Amino acid sequence: SVGSLPLDKVAYDWTLAQSVLRKAAADVEQCLLALLAVLAVALPILALDMALPGESGARLPLPGAIVAIGAVRALFVAARVSEACGRLPALINAMHFGPGTERARQHTVDYIASSAAGLYVFDTRLTTSAVLKTAY
C-alpha cells in the first residue's frame, strides 16, 4: 500500500511522474492547439449549416456535431489530469505513514502542492476553468 512507502520515495516518484507529465504535455501541445483550431472552425460552420436552408430541406449537422463534441470532450479529459494533480496533496495529507512522520508528510505535501503539476500547453496550465474560458 502507498501508506507503507517511505515519504522520500513518494517525493521521488512524484518528481518522476511530474517530469513524465511535462514531457508528454510538450509532445501533445501542438495537437491540442490543432484541436482548438478545429473547434474554432467547426462550431461556426456547424451553426451556419443549421441556420442556412439547404436545397434538400433540413440538413443533418451530425458530422460537424460529432467533431465538435469529440474535441470538447478531449479538452475536458486533458484538463482533468491537472485537476487530479491538484487534489493529490489533500489525499496524501489524509494518509497515515506511521508515527513520527507528520513533519515529513507535511514537507511532501508542500512539495507536491508547490510543484503545480498538471498538463501544460505552451506554459499555461490546462484546467477545466481554462477550457471553459477559451470556449467562451
Image: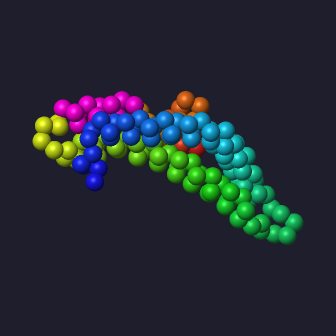
Q: Quadrant of the C terminus?
A: top right
Determine the residue located farthest toward the right in the rendered image. Answer: 55
The residue shown at (37%, 36%) is 12
User: In the displayed structure, does residue 87 sit left or right of residue 49?
Assistant: left
Q: Main secondary structure of the magenta part?
A: helix
Q: Position of residue 19 (x, y in %)?
A: 49, 35
User: In the displayed structure, does residue 43 sit left or right of residue 123?
Assistant: right
14, 66: nearer the viewer = 14
39, 14: nearer the viewer = 14
Span shown in magenta = 103-115
Q: Position of residue 129 (x, y in %)?
A: 47, 41
Q: State which quadrant residue 13 falls in.
A: top left
The residue shown at (20%, 44%) is 97
Whether 82 is among the magenta residues is no
Q: State which quadrant residue 54 falls in.
A: bottom right
125, 21: nearer the viewer = 21
Visible residue check, residue 19: yes
